[in-house]
Image: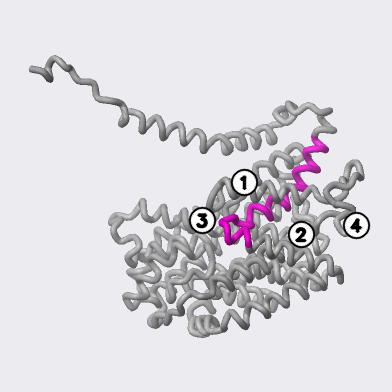
Amino acid sequence: LLYCLLGVVIGMLIGVLPGLGPAATIAILLPLAYGIDPVTAIIMLAGIFYGAQYGGTITSVLLRLPGGASSVVTVFDGYRLAKEGRAGTALGIAATGSFIGGTTGIIGLTFLAPVVAGFALDFGPPEYAALALLGILLVATISNGSKTKALIAAAFGLLLATVGRDVFTGAERFTFGNLNLADGIDFVPVAMGLFGLGEILYNLEERHRAAKAPAKVANVWPSRADLKQSSGAIGRGSVLGFFLGILPGGGATISSMAASALEKKRAKDPSRSGKGAAEGVAGPETANNAAATSSFIPLLTLGIPANATMALMFGALLMQGVTPGPELVDQHPDLFWGVVNSMYIGNILLLIMSIPLVGVFVRILRVRAAILAPFTALITLLGAYRIDNSMFDVVLVLFFGVIGYLMKKFGFEPGPLVLAFVLGELLEANLRRSLLVLHGDLGGFFGRPISATLLVVFVAVALWPAIQSLLARRKAAPAHEPVKTNKAKEKI
């Protein structure tokens, strides 16, 4: 319970601080998780993740400054409500929706995860290979930003996953004679570099943002009319966020954007969107919290991280000697049900904290980046050294920190790289095992119902952009056809 409280408080603090985000925080705290009980560690890290969804709302509404990517769309209507003197109403609606969305996700996790785990026991090497392949593609195609850049980042992640000694033959690959790379690149330095140090360097460059005075908060509890107006958006956000959170490549950011788009389409008066509509706050904030919880389902039951933050949770579990997958529920029931139960408590704690302590969290923004950034960087490097007492890990963190900074600067998201790096080993190992079992016959993948279905979905997702482009051309073609006229009639 203490670590659950600690996790959600840290999560809210990180949500309030623009730029850092839950992924970077979890990456920095991975060494701390290594030294404590597995159940306690995962409860704390999970609290950071879903707690950050609450915290990001505060600065979005009061300062028009998103605390994280999942709070970007809340800015439009939330800040407009604050300008109208209804900041308390916006925060109250967001807190209520977040609690309902988070609780919906937890209930779904409670009942659906054991069913998925039982179904996943039928998975063999071909099924896991197909699932990992589909996961990598979905991450690259569904994620924000340029699809080409996401695919390039994912390809680089797959390349990094091949570094080290081949499990099947014992041959060394891409080690360049360095014994430190013989066992492959450890996940923790990669995560701490890309998300921790890389984010710090990038945010230092962006620290010239002008400071804004936060809007005043009064009457934080929304009225019955506001709740009635927002109830539909909260219900739709809960369902949409839950299902998008399960998908590889989904998560809180995609869910909040999808919920915002859905509310705009359903609005009776579309002109209200972006001008202080309560639904524009309720829908996205509900969806991102539902997705933050439901994304634990594929991680805990299939061993497949749905997004970058879940990839870090995957690494934290492996550090603790726990392998996520179908047998986790039976082999580690204390961990699985401990995390689920902590989420119920954590959401209640966040609802209690998110309204009365708004003023405290806003004051944290006064901490100068010149003080916060060096302190965080020092903790990151000390944590990297602490894992194996190796300076090589520190060098790796510095290397991937520079890579992470350059990726952010040139528009490459580090999420696809990390997810491909995590799934790369799973993909290669199971693909090669499958080929051994099937005697090199790739057609054997289509002889198994589950792997065949997953591969059909993979092909459909891969070809969907081309199909969309073709359909768009066909629609546009009639408009560009020359109009035929009768020249004889024109002369008359």
Circle 3: is it few (<14), some (14-19), or many (20+) Cα within 10 Å? many
Residue 367, picture quadrant: bottom right
For image coordinates 83% across by 61% down, the residue present is: 321
Please state which of residues 100 and 219 is positioned toward the viewer in this rendering: 219
Residue 456 drawn at (x, y percent): 62, 33
Query: Mark 3 or 2, which is nearer the eye?
Result: 2
Upstream in the sequence, badge 1 or badge 3?
A: 1
Give the label on residue 187, or none: 2
For image coordinates 39% across by 65% down, the residue present is: 76
Distance in Å between CA atoms under marks 3 and 4? 43 Å
SS assignment at label 3? helix
Upstream in the sequence, badge 1 or badge 4?
A: 1
Circle 2: is it few (<14), some (14-19), or many (20+) Cα within 10 Å? many
In the rendered image, which residue does mark 3 sit on?
255
Residue 318 drawn at (x, y percent): 79, 59
Upstream in the sequence, badge 2 or badge 1?
A: 1
Circle 4: is it few (<14), some (14-19), or many (20+) Cα within 10 Å? few
SS assignment at label 4? helix
Upstream in the sequence, badge 3 or badge 2?
A: 2
Q: Is residue 74 magenta?
A: no
In the rendered image, which residue does mark 4 sit on?
179
The stretch in magenta equals 406-434
Upstream in the sequence, badge 3 or badge 4?
A: 4
Label 2 sits on what residue type?
A: Phe
Majority secondary structure of magenta residues: helix
In the rendered image, which residue does mark 1 sit on?
151
| On screen, residue 469 above or below 62 | above
SS assignment at label 2? helix
Whether residue 95 is visible to the viewer of this picture, yes or no, is: no
| On screen, residue 28 above or below 297 | below
Task: Locate the N terminus and report the quarter of the image it occupies.
Answer: bottom right
Instruction: Tell me if label 3 and label 2 are in contact, CB under 8 Å.
Output: no
